[in-house]
Image (spheres, rainbow, N blue to C red):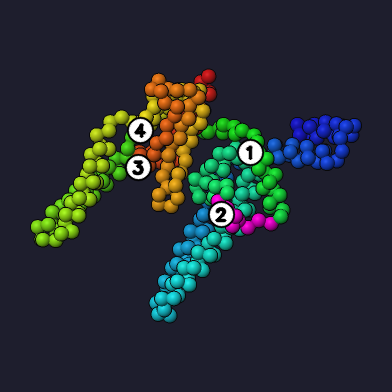
Amino acid sequence: MIKYCRYCIRRFHKFFVGDFFWDSILSNLSSIYKMEKITVDQAIQRGQQMVNYPIFAIMIIGFGFSIYLVTILKSGWVVLIGFIATFVLSWLWWSYMITKWRVWAFENCRNVHELKRRAINEKLIWPDGSRFERTEIRNVAQQKKIIRANRKFQIADEPELIADDGTIPEETRIYYSKITLAIYWITGSGLFLFGVYLIVEGDILGYFSVVLSLFSLYYANKKSSMKEAYIILNAKGIKTLNTAFVNWENIKLIQTRLIGMGKNATWHLIVELKKKDSQGNWGDDIEIVDLSISPKKIEKLIKLYQQRNRDYR
C-alpha cells in the first residue's frame, strides 16, 4: 500500500511540484503510517521504566548513602550536601531522559491527545507553559522531531481496541471503599478512647483527641449512610452521583484527571454532555478518591463499556 502511495506521489511530483513539497508529503505520509505502532498504555509504561523508576532508585540510594555517611563522618552537613546532590542528579536524569521518551512516544503513538493527558497525570511531563517544562534538555535534532511529532495534535484521537475477555460484568457499580471506611471507624474510635483516657488522667490534650475523633467518626458515618453508587457503568451509558443516567452518544467528553499538585492533588472524573440530562445538568466533576475501584481502573472500564456500546450498534 505504501509503495503504491509513494509511486503516485512521485508521478504527481514529476509534473506539478518541486522537491520541497515532495519531501514534505513523504514525511507526513511516513508519520501517518508510524502512528499505529504502540498504544498509550505501552508508552506510559515505558515512560515509567525510563524516567520515574530510575529517579525513585536514585533518591532512595542517594538519601540512604547520605545518612550512612553521617554515621561515619559525624557531620550534619553531609546530609544536607547529599540531599542536594541527590535532588540535582534526579532532576538531571528527568531533564535528559524525558526528552528521549517524549520523542519516542509521540512519534510512535497514534492517540497523542490522550498520551499527553495521561503523561501529565502520571507525573512524567509537566503541563504546557510550566517553568519546569523548560528544564527539559533537548538538542537541535530532538527539538525538530518534537515539532514534527506535534503535528499529530491536529488529528483527533481514535478509540483504542481493548481486550474484552468477558470477565467484566454487564454493569459495574462503584461505591465508597469499605477499607477506607473501616480505617476511619477504627481511627475515630481509637482517638476517642485515647482522648477519654487522657481527660481522666487530667491531660488537656485529651479534649483535642476527642474533637479529632468526632470529625473522623462523623465522616465515616456520613459515607456509610450513602447507599447510592458513586458511578454506574454499562454498555448503554454512565450515571454519576450528581447526574441522571446518560447514554454514551450524549457524552461530549469524559476523562479522569489529576487536579492539583503534590499532596493536594486529587483524582476527578470530568463529564461534559452534548445536551442537558433529565435533571438539567451539562455534566459533572466529582472526586474519585477512596472508592472501591481505583481511578486508573475506572478509566479503563469507561473505555471498555464505550467499546461494547460501539460493538452492539
State the residue at coordinates (16%, 56%).
206
Identify the mark nearer the N-term, 2 or 3: 2
Distance CA(mark 1)–CA(mark 4): 33 Å
Q: Are marks 2 and 4 in contact (CB under 8 Å)?
A: no
Q: Which residue is mark 3?
A: 290
Residue at x 59%, y 57% (from the top left corner): 135
- The answer to whether 168 appears left or right of 54 in the picture is left
Disc 2 is placed on an element classified as: loop
Type of amino acid at the residue the image marks with label 4: Tyr
Residue placed under numbered mark 4 in the picture:
230
Q: Label 1: which residue?
A: 153
Q: Nearer the viewer, residue 121 or 166?
A: 121
Nearer the observer, 164 or 273? 273
Task: Please name whichever residue, 28 or 208, is drawn nearer the observer in this view of the structure.
Answer: 208
Quick check: is 131 in the magenta stretch? yes
270 is within the stretch colored magenta = no
Query: Spatial distance from mark 4 to mark 3, Cα to Cα?
Result: 11 Å
Q: Quick check: marks 1 and 4 in contact, CB under 8 Å?
A: no
Q: Are marks 2 and 3 in contact (CB under 8 Å)?
A: no
Image x and y of residue 80, in percent = 45, 71
* Res. 131 mark: 2
Q: Nearer the viewer, mark 2 or mark 3?
A: 2
Whichever of labels 2 and 4 marks the residue nearer the N terminus, that label is 2
